[in-house]
């Protein structure tokens, strides 16, 4: 094995050029001012603003229907009305949320999503459109952005599902709560793009990429063209 000094000499003394960090680049938003035709019937949980823009979807009231998500999927399939896909919006924090409330919120999110994963794994339910997990401020696309720890944990859970259950076609989309973001998400449902992790900021669509590390920590997004290749 080469000694450390020899490696540093080969690098010219600057080992930082071998360091990379996660960054975000802007990608084209699917065209259209109005949501296009969404394939099949989608279950949209906890996201009334989006449900209003997707004709034919079934809104899922998480507060009024406490049964696990997987059970709802099973019942729909048994009635001969299976869903093409699911949009699950992570619950937002309350104004006076305690530490115990944070834990309970995360446990509820994970319990519902795990029930859906296990249901699909059982073979009785299929989601050709996939399971879309919508978070808000789970990731920081620029330096200084605040994040919600529960939403961040939910994002990490979703990444685990992507790696371990690729057939489930999970998508992670982090929004900022803006009306432009809701419209962009509705367009995405009608015209999906092949990106497993996306962020929506003021209607702009950002995709995660590994970028060379910078001492300044600057991670401002730039626009990608169609020739961009990720390795």
Image (spheres, rainbow, N blue to C red):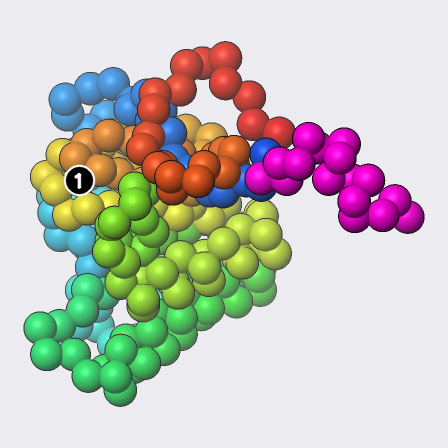
- Image vertical order of residue 145 relative to residue 180, above or below: below
Tag 1 secondary structure: helix
Which quadrant of the figure has residue 71? Answer: bottom left
Q: How far across and how far down the image is residue 107, in percent?
A: 36, 77
Q: How far across and how far down the image is residue 64, in percent?
A: 15, 73
Tell me: 206 left or right of 179.
right
Q: Decide whether residue 2 is among the magenta residues.
A: yes
Instruction: Decide which of 8, 117 is in the foreground and name it.
Output: 8
- Image vertical order of residue 143 relative to residue 31, above or below: below
The residue labelled by disc 1 is: 182
Residue located at (30% from left, 45% from top): 143
Which quadrant of the figure has residue 186? Answer: top left
**In the current view of this chain or complex, which residue is farthest to the bottom?**
100
Placement of the C terminus among the 4 image quadrants: top right
- Image vertical order of residue 208 relative to residue 150, above or below: above
Q: Which region shows up in magenta?
A: 1-16
Query: What is the tally of numbered marks visible in this picture?
Result: 1
Q: Decide whether residue 70 is among the magenta residues.
A: no
Q: How far across and how far down the image is residue 112, in percent?
A: 37, 70
Residue located at (25% from left, 49% from top): 144
Residue located at (16% from left, 79% from top): 97
Instruction: Decide which of 159, 23 is in the foreground and name it.
Output: 23
Instruction: Decide which of 130, 149 is in the foreground and name it.
Output: 149
Tell me: 173 left or right of 204.
right
What crowding class fits label 1: few (fewer than 14 Cα within 10 Å), some (14-19), or many (20 or more)?
A: many
Residue located at (62% from left, 36% from top): 14
Tell me: 215 left or right of 168.
left
Can residue 222 be seen here? The reply is yes
């Amino acid at each position: 094995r080469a000694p450390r000094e020899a490696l540093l000499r080969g690098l010219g003394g600057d080992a930082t050029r071998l360091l990379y960090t996660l960054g975000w680049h802007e990608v084209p938003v699917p065209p259209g001012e109005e949501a296009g035709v969404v394939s099949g019937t989608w279950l949209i949980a906890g996201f009334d603003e989006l449900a209003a823009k997707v004709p034919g979807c079934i809104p899922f009231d998480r507060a009024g229907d406490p049964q696990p998500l997987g059970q709802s999927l099973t019942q729909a399939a048994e009635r001969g009305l299976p869903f093409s896909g699911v949009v699950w919006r992570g619950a937002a924090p309350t104004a006076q949320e305690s530490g115990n409330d944070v834990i309970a919120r995360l446990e509820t999110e994970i319990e519902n999503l795990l029930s859906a994963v296990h249901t699909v794994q059982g073979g009785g339910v299929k989601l050709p459109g996939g399971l879309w997990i919508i978070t808000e401020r789970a990731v920081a696309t620029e330096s200084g952005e605040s994040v919600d720890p529960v939403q961040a944990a939910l994002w990490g859970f979703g990444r685990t599902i992507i790696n371990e259950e690729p057939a489930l076609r999970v998508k992670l989309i982090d929004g900022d709560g803006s009306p432009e973001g809701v419209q962009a998400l509705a367009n995405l449902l009608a015209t999906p793009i092949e990106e497993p992790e996306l962020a929506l900021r003021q209607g702009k669509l950002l995709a995660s990429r590994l970028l060379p590390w910078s001492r300044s920590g600057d991670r401002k997004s730039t626009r990608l063209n169609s020739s961009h290749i990720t390795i």
